[in-house]
Image (cartoon, grey):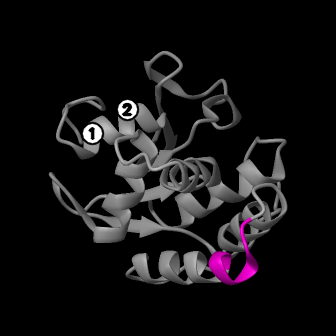
Amino acid sequence: MPRICIDLNVWCGAFLSRSHGRSDTATRTIVEAARRGECTRGDLTLVISWGMLDHLATVLMRDFKFAPAYVGDLTRAITGYATQGPSLTLGGVGVLPIHDSEDRHVLETAWSGRADILTTADLRGFAGADAEVLTADRVYRLWRADKSLIVAHPFETAAWLRGEDVFGSDY
């Protein structure tokens, strides 16, 4: 069963799309698959942390002016999507070579949650010099020991969730 970690910019994109009445966006496709816990490929597991949920709540209230009660409902719903529950990801050990602390936390969450895919609109924040380029500026593969992690743009992630072969034959 694939495990997916969704960066905060993807969640925000989905919420903005929804508030504008759009249902046909890549971000909405991704969030809907996480909500259902399945896609055309079968079951799907969401990997997320309490820190990511807290930061998402802050951004939605501060930057998008969503009402606190509405944000509370959204974050509780997302908590329910994560069948194994949000993780408590303790970061800040400086092992991952990412300067942005928010990106580092998301990547640490993806690795610790054994995610197969991390979807983000901020690929440059995650794909360092050691990343394997599968599709330039769209799909990268990172390695730690014997485990790989696909880092993909929401367009490619949504296509993969719909059954397209965008990550190679291993996925």
Count neighbours of disc 1 (C-alpha within 10 A) and say few if under 14, some if 14 to 19, many if 20 or more: some
- Which residue sits at x=28%, y=35%? 159
Say which amino acid is labelled 2: Glu
| The one of 14 and 121 positioned closer to us in this rendering | 14
Q: Position of residue 64 (x, y in %)?
A: 75, 56
- Which residue sits at x=64%, y=37%? 126
Q: Is residue 161 rendered to the left or right of residue 18?
A: left
- Which residue sits at x=72%, y=49%? 103
The residue tagged 1 is 160
Q: Position of residue 59 (x, y in %)?
A: 77, 60
Query: What secondary structure is found at the residue carrying circle 2?
Result: helix
Q: Is residue 116 visible?
A: no
For the C terminus, the image quarter is top left
Q: Is residue 76 above or below residue 112?
A: below
The residue tagged 2 is 156
Span colored in magenta: 66-71
